[in-house]
């Protein structure tokens, strides 16, 4: 086996429960983003652009879409004889069979995979963030400081700091303290969940802490390294980084792509985002259609009006239909005379004629007010919305609904129709 200086381990097993019906049948890293991509494309492309050619992708929850998307890694030039991309689901061992329980436990269960490359350094990544980062620059920082552990960190607003794991550093960026979501933060430098470890250091910590339940980097591995005198440093990052873990942040990140001067640019020649996309026909925009400040995927047919929205591949938008400030994912078909205002519509949804989404005033969602908020209408994949109905704000729809599911033709604000199992 050829030795690798650094390999990446990409944690992509999360359910993403705060995305509600969007992740009822698909892992969060496989959710569509930006009309063409999936969330996992961003860390994978960062690896390729940073010269990292060996990536283990740890999957668990609903992995089929993710596995199919990654395949053998051709779009990212990760189809290699030595290294490349490897999907690592939990597997049955001779003495026991267990799911990944915690971020560090997932890495621990794949010690043999990492050992097979005898790396000097291991890069730990999360599969559900939108950003561009050159990990090679971070590795240079790690080496220059003779670090055992380097944590990528970025400044966050002080009022949000208590939501994050925070690092406190000295003037040389060496970490003196690490606080996991403190009530009274003493720093606003937040861990991004991106780590570079010397493999010998990480291996020892994983083996020592393996008995911890839900063994986690922030709660167990980082504190263990610090308590045992390891050299921990913070690599400060000041670029665009978005955790798209809630419907609100997911919607915002998509909308930011279509700003006049987008904060996050998908079109930079020197730092491309790669994806596995089908070869399909070009988009069609009819003579009567209006499109303004939007992204429209290949193979889409637009007969209506689209304003400030992100439209995926193969979407059909009917005549006299108006779509505003919305995300419509691939292969969704929307009928004629429809009004859609601030909605997230997942893949392969069918919306009938004369439908209105996003009517009235927002009301607190009765099913899960912390998930279905932000004034959005959220529709899960493969759902059907019948003709002639109206849907209020802070609502969720999942499954093949019929006219009978809408009292007096209305799903009021804050209400939900969930037909595809018990999705909260």
Image (cartoon, rainbow, N blue to C red):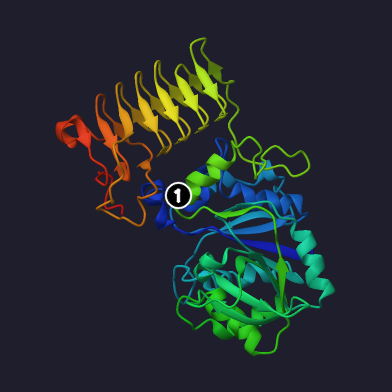
Residue 298 figure quarter: top right
Placement of 324 over or under 27, stated as above or below: above
Looking at the image, is 305 positioned above or below residue 308? Answer: above
| Residue 83 percent coordinates (x, y) | 72, 57
The crowding category of the residue bearing disc 1, from other C-alpha atoms within 10 Å (few below 14, some 14 to 19, many at least 20), is some
> Is 57 or 325 nearer to us in this picture?
325
Placement of 335 over or under 277, stated as above or below: above
Q: Residue furthest bottom?
A: 228
Percent x, y for residue 246? 45, 53
SS class of the residue under badge 1? helix
Q: Is residue 393 left or right of residue 27?
A: left
Residue 184 in percent (x, y) is at 50, 78
Report whether 297 appears left or right of 318.
Answer: right
Residue under label 1: 248
Q: Position of residue 362 (x, y in %)?
A: 31, 44
In this rendering, position of residue 420 left or right of residue 341: left
Q: Find the residue positioned furthest to the top.
A: 287
Q: Is residue 226 visible?
A: yes
- The image quadrant where one finds the C terminus is bottom left
Residue found at x 24% / y 35%: 401
Q: Which residue is rendered at x = 26% and y = 31% of the image? A: 390
Q: Residue at x 35, y 23 (%)?
A: 338
Does 415 sit left or right of 228 as displayed?
left
Quadrant of the rendered image containing residue 273: top right
Quadrant location of the N terminus in the rendered image: bottom right
Q: Is residue 31 visible?
A: no
Q: State whether residue 106 is above or below residue 271.
A: below
- Residue 217 falls in which quadrant of the image? bottom right
Number of dots carrying numbers = 1
């Amino acid at each position: 086996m050829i030795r690798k200086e650094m390999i990446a381990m990409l944690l992509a097993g999360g359910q993403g429960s705060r995305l509600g019906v969007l992740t009822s049948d698909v892992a969060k890293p496989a959710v569509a983003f930006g009309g063409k991509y999936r969330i996992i494309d961003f860390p994978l492309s960062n690896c390729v652009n940073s010269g990292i050619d060996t990536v283990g992708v740890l999957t668990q929850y609903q992995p089929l879409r993710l596995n199919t998307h990654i395949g053998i890694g051709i779009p990212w030039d990760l189809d290699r004889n030595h290294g490349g991309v490897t999907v690592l689901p939990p597997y049955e061992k001779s003495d026991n069979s267990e799911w990944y329980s915690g971020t560090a436990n997932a890495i621990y269960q794949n010690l043999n995979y990492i050992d097979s490359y005898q790396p000097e350094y291991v890069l730990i990544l999360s599969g559900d963030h939108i950003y561009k980062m050159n990990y090679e620059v971070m590795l240079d920082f790690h080496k220059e400081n003779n670090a055992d552990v380097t944590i990528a960190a970025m400044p966050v607003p002080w009022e949000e700091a208590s939501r994050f794991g925070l690092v406190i550093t000295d003037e040389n960026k060496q970490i003196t303290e690490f606080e996991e979501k403190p009530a009274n933060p003493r720093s606003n430098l937040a861990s991004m969940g991106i780590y570079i470890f010397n493999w010998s250091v990480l291996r020892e910590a994983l083996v020592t802490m393996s008995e911890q339940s839900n063994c986690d980097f922030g709660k167990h591995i980082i504190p263990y390294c610090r308590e045992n005198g390891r050299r921990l440093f913070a690599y400060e990052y000041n670029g665009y980084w978005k955790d798209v873990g809630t419907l609100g942040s997911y919607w915002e990140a998509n909308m930011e792509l279509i700003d006049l001067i987008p904060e996050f640019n998908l079109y930079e020649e020197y730092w491309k985002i790669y994806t596995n996309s089908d070869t399909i026909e070009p988009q069609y925009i009819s003579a009567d259609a209006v499109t303004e400040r939007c992204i429209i995927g290949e193979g889409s047919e637009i007969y209506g009006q689209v304003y400030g929205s992100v439209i995926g591949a193969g979407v059909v938008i009917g005549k006299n239909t108006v779509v505003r400030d919305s995300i419509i994912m691939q292969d969704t078909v929307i009928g004629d005379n429809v009004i859609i205002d601030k909605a997230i519509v997942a893949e392969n949804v069918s919306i009938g004629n004369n439908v209105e989404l996003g009517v009235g005033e927002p009301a607190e969602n009765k099913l899960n007010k912390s998930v279905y908020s932000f004034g959005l209408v959220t529709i899960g994949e493969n759902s059907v919305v019948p003709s002639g109905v109206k849907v209020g704000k802070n609502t969720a729809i999942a499954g093949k609904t019929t006219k009978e599911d809408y009292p007096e033709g209305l799903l009021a604000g804050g209400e939900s129709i969930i037909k595809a199992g018990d999705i909260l």
